[in-house]
């Protein structure tokens, strides 16, 4: 392997590179936040990651076109979503007993205020979802050898998030919240993927990663659509103490299924560009900040999408 210790840690910030690559419709599916999910490192040891993701979904979209809410005559025969502000605080725990194997846990807490106008209504209804989300557990193996680092990942997303929230105010007060807005999906999902990062030329390193998520179960007539993410990026190691990075993240998700799913308004494909940087904070800590900007967004039905997303955090190597 050709990476220095600093290069490997910087590469860890890129691995599984996506942050919230697709903020799905608040009626369709939960936010995927795979960014830095596995904390891939070239050294054995224990690492703690504290991360915050902010995904403000404020743009109503159909296909690849924005919808002008002001042009919609109310009441109408379909729901008109106003906003969903997703706030995620995630604790990541990573242990690598040697250079080949690693184990990771991602424990998210979320806060998600949501406002919408229900079909047949002229006034808005609101909800506030907060608490523990769905925990992710995974293992990785990167013992292939050769130039750079190549690895595979397998794991599970567990149904630890609540699924019984209701609207707090408006005409829908007391009614069940859409399944895509709940803290958890209620399903156990398989997680899998592979990655590679190496040196491109001189002080430029690169990475590529592909991952998938497939629901293994359904609960109360709901099953989230299968999803796949492909990411690639570069980082520059020529500056002392700071590592600029860029990523491109492509994510696609199938429609949800089941009687409780809003199938027609779920699923889609998005391409994001994500500039950012990692900053060394002493000998055992690194801070990072990324912004994701949409290059293309194609959704089914009517869905809320973000104009940008933010991810920030700090990693500690113990």
Image (spheres, grey):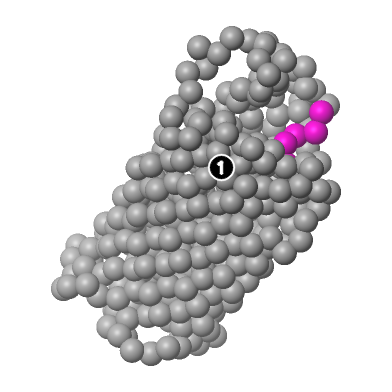
Q: For this rendering, which residue is in front, 238 or 208?
A: 208
Q: Is residue 284 left or right of residue 219?
A: left
Q: Is residue 246 visible?
A: yes
Instruction: Give the percent coordinates (x, y) of residue 21.
Output: 47, 50
Q: Is residue 188 left or right of residue 308?
A: right
Instruction: Give the percent coordinates (x, y) of residue 111.
Output: 63, 39
**Quadrant in which residue 122 is drawn:** top right
Instruction: Give the percent coordinates (x, y) of residue 245.
Output: 29, 57
Q: Is residue 87 above or below residue 43?
A: above
Q: Residue at x 51, y 82 (%)?
A: 141
Q: Residue at x 34, y 73 (%)?
A: 197
Residue on which disc 1 sits: 24
Q: Where does the magenta region start and end?
A: 175-179
Q: Is residue 275 magenta?
A: no
Instruction: Give the percent coordinates (x, y) of residue 118.
Output: 70, 21
Q: For this rendering, which residue is in front, 187 or 65?
A: 65
Q: Disc 1 on helix, strand or loop?
A: loop
Q: Is residue 128 above or below residue 246?
A: above
Q: Residue at x 43, y 61 (%)?
A: 230
Q: Residue at x 71, y 48 (%)?
A: 257
Please tell me whether the stretch drawn in magenta is mainly helix, strand or loop: loop
Are there few (<14), some (14-19), or many (20+) residues within 10 Å of tag 1? many
Q: Quadrant of the N terminus?
A: bottom left
Q: Is residue 307 left or right of residue 88?
A: left
């Amino acid at each position: 392997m050709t990476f220095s210790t600093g290069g490997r840690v910087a590469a860890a910030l890129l691995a599984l590179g996506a942050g919230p690559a697709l903020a799905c419709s608040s009626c369709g599916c939960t936010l995927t936040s795979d960014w830095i999910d596995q904390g891939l490192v070239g050294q054995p040891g224990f690492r703690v990651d504290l991360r915050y993701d902010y995904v403000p979904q404020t743009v109503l979209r159909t296909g690849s076109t924005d919808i002008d809410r002001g042009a919609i005559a109310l009441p109408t025969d379909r729901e008109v979503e106003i906003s969903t502000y997703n706030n995620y605080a995630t604790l990541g725990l990573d242990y690598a007993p040697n250079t080949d194997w690693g184990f990771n846990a991602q424990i998210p807490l979320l806060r998600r205020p949501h406002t919408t106008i229900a079909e047949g209504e002229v006034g808005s209804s609101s909800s506030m979802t907060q608490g523990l989300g769905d925990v992710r557990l995974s293992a990785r193996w990167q013992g292939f050898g050769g130039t750079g680092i190549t690895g595979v990942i397998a794991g599970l997303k567990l149904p630890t998030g609540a699924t019984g929230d209701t609207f707090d105010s408006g005409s829908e007060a007391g009614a069940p919240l859409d399944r895509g807005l709940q803290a958890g999906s209620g399903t156990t999902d398989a997680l899998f993927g592979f990655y590679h990062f190496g040196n491109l030329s001189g002080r430029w390193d690169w990475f590529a990663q592909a991952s998938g998520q497939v629901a293994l179960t359904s609960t109360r007539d709901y099953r989230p659509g299968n999803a796949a993410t492909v990411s690639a990026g570069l980082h520059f190691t020529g500056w002392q103490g700071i590592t600029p990075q860029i990523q491109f993240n492509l994510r696609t998700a199938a429609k949800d299924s089941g009687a409780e799913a809003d199938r027609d308004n779920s699923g889609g494909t998005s391409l994001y560009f994500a500039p950012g940087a990692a900053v060394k904070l002493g000998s055992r800590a690194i801070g990072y900040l990324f912004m994701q900007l949409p290059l293309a967004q194609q959704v089914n039905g009517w869905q809320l999408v973000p104009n940008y997303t933010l991810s920030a955090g700090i990693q500690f190597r113990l």
